Image: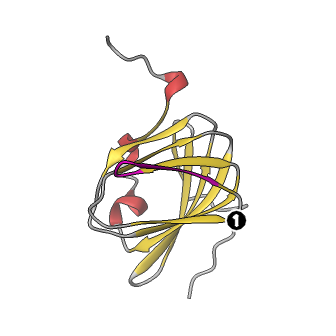
Amino acid sequence: MKFYDWKNHEDRSQTDGYSRGVAVGEKMMMAHVQLDEGAITAPHAHAHEEIIYVVSGRWQVTVGDQVFVLEANQSLVVPPNVEHSSLALAETLAVVATNYRPEWRENSDFWLHYNTDNHLWAV
């Protein structure tokens, strides 16, 4: 058994505008995600289903060709192997549940998360 206190959790991964703490079980995990307004998750797909629950804020999630704007007390199931991306429309707190994914624990997917205000794109 493990106990997580998100107020004092020191093992959070920090990326530009994106902070994630993870609770890890044997076969599943949950991420406690804090997003600054403007934080982006780049388009990607993986073999794992995800369930997103927004606690507060506004999080725009694009799944395939559908766009959803999630607000407090709303959830979205992202199917496996479907490209998805996101944009925080306001400061957001969310919980994301999935089966075990080492990249979340290791933060090896850090390159997916950034804030557009801090990046310049070549034209």
Q: Position of residue 94 (x, y in %)?
A: 62, 59
**Colour pattern of the rendering:** secondary structure
Badge 1: residue crowd in 10 Å (few <14, some 14–19, many ≥20): few
Q: Position of residue 121 (x, y in %)?
A: 37, 17
Image quadrant in which the C terminus is located = top left
The answer to whether residue 104 of the structure is visible from this angle is: yes
Q: Position of residue 76 (x, y in %)?
A: 52, 64
Up/down of 36 relative to 99, above or below? above
Q: Position of residue 32 (x, y in %)?
A: 59, 62
Q: Residue at x 57, y 38 (%)?
A: 17
Q: How many marks?
A: 1
Magenta highlight: main SS: strand
Up/down of 57 relative to 46, above or below? above
Q: Residue at x 68, y 43 (%)?
A: 91
Q: Is 7 in the magenta?
A: no
The answer to whether residue 12 of the structure is visible from this angle is: no
Residue at the limit of the structure toward the front, as seen here: 66
Region in magenta? 63-70
Residue type, numbered disc 1:
Asn
- Tell which of 5 and 115 is nearer to you: 115
Residue at the limit of the structure toward the bottom, as seen here: 1
Q: Residue at x 42, y 63 (%)?
A: 105
- Residue 111, image quadrant: top left
Q: Is 67 in the magenta?
A: yes
Left or right of residue 121: residue 24: right
Image quadrant in which the N terminus is located = bottom right
Left or right of residue 115: residue 121: left
Per the image, label 1 sits on a secondary structure element best described as loop
In the rendered image, which residue does mark 1 sit on? 73
